Image: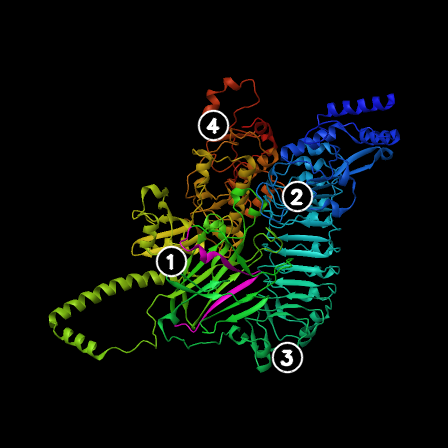
């Protein structure tokens, strides 16, 4: 062979050795002798020029940490930039069989140098195969791929915080990290990615708010942040994102109002989704400027009615969903001018007037949902053949024969609910109750016959049984899902139940699912709901398919009984049965059980369009002996015998028995009526438990079940009959908390609902026994997590999230809840942690209502004062800027004058970094015998200043005790510079 070729091969071999290649990248050197030396020379030139030792080592290290092998479709003979890696086709890159994969660009230096420009690690397996998900963190070696412009790692189990070094990957145009378990805040450094056109962070466990620095991403076209854990307000800097075309922000706790700049600046939008947020109304009229919109979905807005006028000029709309957004006014005729409209959902609003007849004959319209409004008049008799799904329930229409032919059964589902009113259909005892096997065939479980509910469902379905005992109504289309399935089939075994077959099928709904009991006798009924989450994998699998969250609300007789109900969370995991029961009052011969999706929970795990309510079975039984017309009359002979027996009793004995009986009944009834009268003052009425039920749940309040004891009595862990694990607070007899204060706590907790407030399941009032039943939080209180002996690791991101989330809960109590509430006893022992270390504020026993107009209130603190060190010495790492913000906010919140303390909404904004921390102008109110030095930011006890004077004689710390007096007797203000804490924080104290 030519000596030149030999030298070339030797140089290539030396390059392989120096590069320390792994995972199949040139583990061996194979020398192929070609007949044509010219081709061999060209091949070696390409290889030797394209290989870069640092880049290959980085790629090897990344794959080693991810425990992945390079696909042989592009790793030919160990050369990364080979095979399909050289293809510029997006279909090749997204091919599920080509995974993990890279794309190379070999056009550098006159086609002699290759660089990796795209990296994809995506679990695209259709089957549930264990071990395919990639785990770990984002490795810093990604920085060694300097030309990377495409990073896609969706559908894995990556964890840890989003590293700030991503901001140095300046060529990134696409960054997609959806369906992982990344935590902590979004690093502000992401705002340095000026070339970014797509950012996807959906379905993660992030915290905090959107960094204002993301407003620097002026080339951003697509933003996906569904269910990623963020909250707060959209930063004003986002007005700079004028190139946005797609925004998906479903199940995000955005607060405030939808900013006007969404309509004024984001004029290139083609798709906008704001659902499951905490936005206030009205919808801004500036959205009328979004004339390029094809799809607009806004849902679940509160406080402030909105008008439909802004949609008049949105001529390109094909999909318009304005559901549960407090729309008011009439249904305007100009809605029919949107000639491209295919789906229109205006349900659950306050629309009035009649339906424009032209709406039913639009050639493009396929799906129409107008249920739960106040529409009236006649329903148009003609409809287009393309209009396949219509829902008009819960309105005030006047129905004629033609409309009844078009909508059979609709007369039973108007707001007045005319069917079987005042006409109970009870011929046998079996008619007094009903049980339904949702989504499945008839079966018998625990002696109960569950009737079949296995008829075909559609987007707008109403079915009534042949016996007319019950009916079911479903409304909605699963978004972005081709196969619209309304039944979940499960072949495994559901735990915590003696009848797992009851949970093998469940009825699903993407929006609203109602079950009706018809022709019932008026009175109190026990409603039992059977749930089990069978659509997601167990978290222990560490698979992205386990990251789904199904969240919905449950209403019984119009009262919300379950808010943001998460089956798997309440049951303690997936494939576990839970059967909550409720007491319902039937007053007009019908019962309504309503499962409602309000935009919460994940939308696309384990597949697109997988969300909404799910239920396996329903059982409804009366709490009284029904008046059944089919029961035969009494036997005259038996009646005569009983009369003779009664006549044989002496008059004195009868009189004594009656006196005792009426006395006991009166006392019991009076006690019960008093308790009922107290409960009737609460709206909605809370769920009640019997004392015997709670006694059994806690094993007779066993000491082994005791979780702790506060100022008002002990708290026990208990397990209810339906499998729910709860915390039972038992009011001590010696406590001075009376019935009124006890009821105040029930009313307070029942009136407020927030993810950072402990959920109240119900209460018990029997005589002098008073108990509260809360959700059980397995990680107990924050003080035990910080100072007790446990295996919880509270790193800085977790602690900061606890602070921020607790502030959000207090802000809701102070400013957002309908009843303004001051807790008055916030301390570490009253902050509980759930399984995901999400904090929840507990113990509203001292809650004090105050007027909306009062922004501050001075009230005695009920808890004990503790002086905490600035930072826990066991913290190895922390974010210095966040720590400074926390300290600064803490000093502001402890000012002696209430008027100098910031409102909680401002506290949240300062902690989140949305606004700067205000200057502290005086020392905290609890520091009465301490001295604060601005220069060093240290606290010193006055007594220790003299004794330690010799130790500090060479320092700048000097003792001062200066006071000023004037006519107003104002306290001296000592300006505090928060930044002077930086030295102490830097040392980890």
Q: CA distance from mark 3 to mark 1?
A: 48 Å
931 with respect to 180 (left or right): left
User: x, y (%) of residue 335?
Assistant: 69, 69
Near mark 1 (Cα within 10 A), the count class, few <14, some 14-19 or many ≥20, is some
Q: CA distance from mark 2 to mark 3?
A: 51 Å
- The residue beneath circle 1 is 688
Q: Position of residue 625 (x, y in %)?
A: 32, 69
- Does residue 703 lie above or below 554 as drawn? above
The mark nearer the N terminus, 3 or 1, is 3
Q: Are marks 1 and 2 in contact (CB under 8 Å)?
A: no
Q: Secondary structure at mark 2?
A: loop
On the rendered image, what quadrant is the N terminus found in?
Answer: top right
Numbered label attached to residue 359: none
Of discs 4 and 2, which sits in the foreground?
2
The residue mark sitting in front, 4 or 1, is 1
Please tell me which of labels 4 and 3 falls first in the chain: 3
Q: CA distance from mark 4 to mark 2?
A: 59 Å
The residue to which callout 2 is attached is 122
Q: Residues at badges 4 and 2 in contact (C-beta under 8 Å)? A: no
Q: Quadrant of residue 972?
A: top right
Q: CA distance from mark 1 to mark 2?
A: 49 Å
**Mark 3, mark 1: which one is toward the viewer?**
3
Q: Are marks 2 and 3 in contact (CB under 8 Å)?
A: no
> At which x and y percent is residue 840?
48, 46
Residue topped by disc 4: 941
Q: Under tag 1, what secondary structure? A: loop
The circle on residue 381 is 3
**Magenta region:** 496-521
- The residue nearer to you, when weighing 66 against 234, is 66
Secondary element under disc 3, as helix, strand or loop, is: loop
Q: Is residue 500 magenta?
A: yes
State yes or no: discs 4 and 1 in contact (Cβ < 8 Å): no
């Amino acid at each position: 062979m030519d000596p030149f070729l030999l030298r070339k091969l030797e140089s290539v071999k030396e390059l392989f050795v120096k590069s320390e290649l792994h995972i199949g990248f040139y583990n061996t050197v194979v020398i192929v002798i070609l007949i044509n030396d010219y081709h061999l020379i060209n091949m070696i030139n390409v290889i030797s020029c394209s290989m870069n030792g640092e880049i290959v080592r980085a790629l090897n290290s990344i794959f080693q940490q991810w425990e992945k092998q390079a696909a042989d479709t592009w790793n030919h003979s160990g050369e990364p930039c080979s095979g399909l890696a050289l293809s510029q086709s997006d279909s090749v890159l997204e091919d599920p069989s080509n995974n993990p994969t890279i794309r190379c660009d070999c056009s550098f230096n006159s086609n002699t140098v290759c660089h990796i420009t795209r990296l994809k690690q995506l679990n695209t397996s259709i089957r549930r195969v264990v071990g395919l998900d990639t785990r770990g963190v984002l490795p810093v070696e990604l920085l060694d791929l300097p030309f990377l412009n495409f990073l896609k790692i969706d559908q894995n189990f990556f964890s840890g915080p989003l590293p700030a070094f991503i901001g140095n990957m300046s060529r990134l145009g696409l960054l997609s990290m959806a369906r992982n378990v990344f935590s902590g805040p979004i690093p502000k450094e992401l705002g340095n990615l000026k070339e970014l056109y797509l950012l996807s962070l959906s379905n993660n466990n992030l915290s905090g708010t959107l960094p204002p620095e993301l407003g620097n991403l002026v080339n951003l076209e697509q933003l996906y942040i569904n269910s990623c854990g963020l909250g707060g307000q959209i930063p004003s800097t986002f007005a700079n994102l004028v190139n946005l075309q797609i925004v998906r922000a479903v199940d995000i706790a955005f607060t405030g109002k939808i900013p006007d700049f969404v309509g004024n600046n984001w004029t290139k939008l083609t798709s906008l989704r704001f659902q499951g947020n905490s936005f206030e109304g009205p919808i801004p009229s500036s959205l009328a400027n979004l004339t390029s919109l094809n799809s607009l979905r806004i849902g679940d807005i509160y406080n402030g009615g909105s008008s439909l006028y802004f949609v008049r000029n949105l001529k390109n709309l094909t999909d318009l969903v304005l559901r549960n957004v407090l729309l008011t006014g009439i249904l305007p005729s100009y809605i029919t001018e949107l000639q491209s409209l295919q789906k229109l959902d205006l349900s659950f609003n306050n629309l009035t007037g009649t339906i424009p007849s032209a709406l039913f004959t639009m050639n493009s319209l396929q799906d129409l949902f107008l249920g739960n409004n106040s529409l009236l008049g006649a329903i148009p008799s003609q409809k287009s053949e393309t209009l396949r799904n219509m829902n008009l329930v819960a309105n005030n229409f006047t129905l004629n024969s033609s409309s009844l032919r078009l909508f059979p059964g609709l007369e039973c589902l108007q707001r007045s609910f005319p069917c079987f009113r005042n006409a109970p259909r009870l011929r046998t005892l079996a008619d007094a109750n009903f049980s339904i096997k949702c989504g499945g065939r008839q079966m018998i479980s625990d002696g109960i016959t569950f009737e079949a509910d296995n008829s075909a469902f559609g987007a707008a379905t109403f079915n009534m049984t042949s016996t007319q005992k019950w009916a079911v109504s479903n409304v909605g289309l699963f978004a972005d899902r081709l196969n619209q399935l309304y039944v979940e089939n499960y072949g495994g075994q559901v735990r915590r139940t003696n009848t797992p077959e009851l949970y093998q099928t469940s009825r699903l709904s993407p929006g609203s699912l109602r079950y009706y009991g018809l022709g019932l006798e008026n009175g109190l009924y026990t409603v039992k709901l059977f749930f089990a989450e069978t659509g997601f994998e167990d978290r222990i699998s560490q698979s992205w398919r386990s990251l789904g969250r199904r969240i919905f609300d449950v209403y019984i007789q119009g009262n919300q009984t379950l808010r943001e109900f998460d089956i798997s969370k309440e049951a303690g995991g997936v494939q576990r049965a839970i059967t909550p029961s409720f007491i319902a009052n039937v007053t007009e011969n019908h019962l309504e059980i309503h499962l409602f999706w309000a935009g919460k929970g994940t939308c696309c795990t384990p597949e697109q369009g997988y969300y909404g309510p799910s239920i396996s079975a329903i059982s409804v039984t009366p709490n009284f002996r029904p008046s059944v017309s089919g029961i035969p009359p009494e036997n005259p002979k038996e009646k005569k015998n009983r009369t003779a027996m009664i006549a044989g009793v002496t008059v004195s004995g009868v009189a004594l028995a009656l006196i005792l009986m009426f006395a006991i009944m009166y006392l019991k009834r009076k006690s019960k009526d008093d308790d009922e009268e107290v409960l009737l003052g609460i709206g909605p009425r809370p769920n009640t438990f019997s004392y015997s039920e709670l006694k059994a749940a806690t094993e007779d309040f066993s000491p082994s079940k005791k979780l702790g004891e506060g100022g008002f009595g002990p708290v026990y862990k208990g397990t209810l009959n339906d499998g729910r694990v709860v915390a039972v607070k038992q009011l001590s007899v010696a406590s001075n908390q009376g019935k009124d204060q006890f009821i105040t706590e029930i009313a307070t907790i029942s009136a407020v609902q927030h993810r950072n407030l402990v959920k109240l399941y119900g209460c018990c009032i029997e005589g002098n026994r008073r108990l509260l039943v809360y959700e059980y939080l397995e990680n107990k209180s924050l003080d035990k997590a910080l100072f007790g002996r446990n295996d919880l690791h509270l790193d800085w991101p977790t602690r900061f999230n606890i602070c921020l989330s607790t502030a959000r809960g207090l802000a809701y109590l102070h400013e957002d809840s309908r009843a303004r509430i001051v807790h008055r006893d916030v301390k570490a022992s009253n902050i509980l942690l759930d399984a995901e270390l999400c904090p929840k504020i507990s113990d509203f026993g001292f809650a004090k209502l105050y007027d909306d107009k009062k922004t501050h209130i001075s009230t005695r603190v009920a808890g004990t004062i503790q002086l905490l060190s600035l930072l826990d010495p066991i913290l190895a790492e922390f974010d210095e800027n966040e720590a400074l913000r926390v300290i600064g906010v803490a000093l502001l919140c402890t000012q002696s004058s209430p008027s100098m303390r910031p409102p909680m909404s401002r506290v949240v904004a300062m902690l989140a970094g949305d606004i700067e921390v205000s200057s502290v102008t005086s020392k905290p109110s609890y520091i009465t015998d301490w001295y604060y030095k601005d220069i060093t930011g240290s606290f010193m006890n006055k007594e220790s200043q003299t004794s330690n004077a010799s130790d500090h004689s060479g320092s700048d710390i000097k003792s001062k005790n200066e006071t000023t007096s004037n006519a107003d007797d104002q306290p001296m203000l000592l300006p505090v510079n928060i930044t002077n804490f930086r030295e102490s924080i830097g040392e980890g104290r």
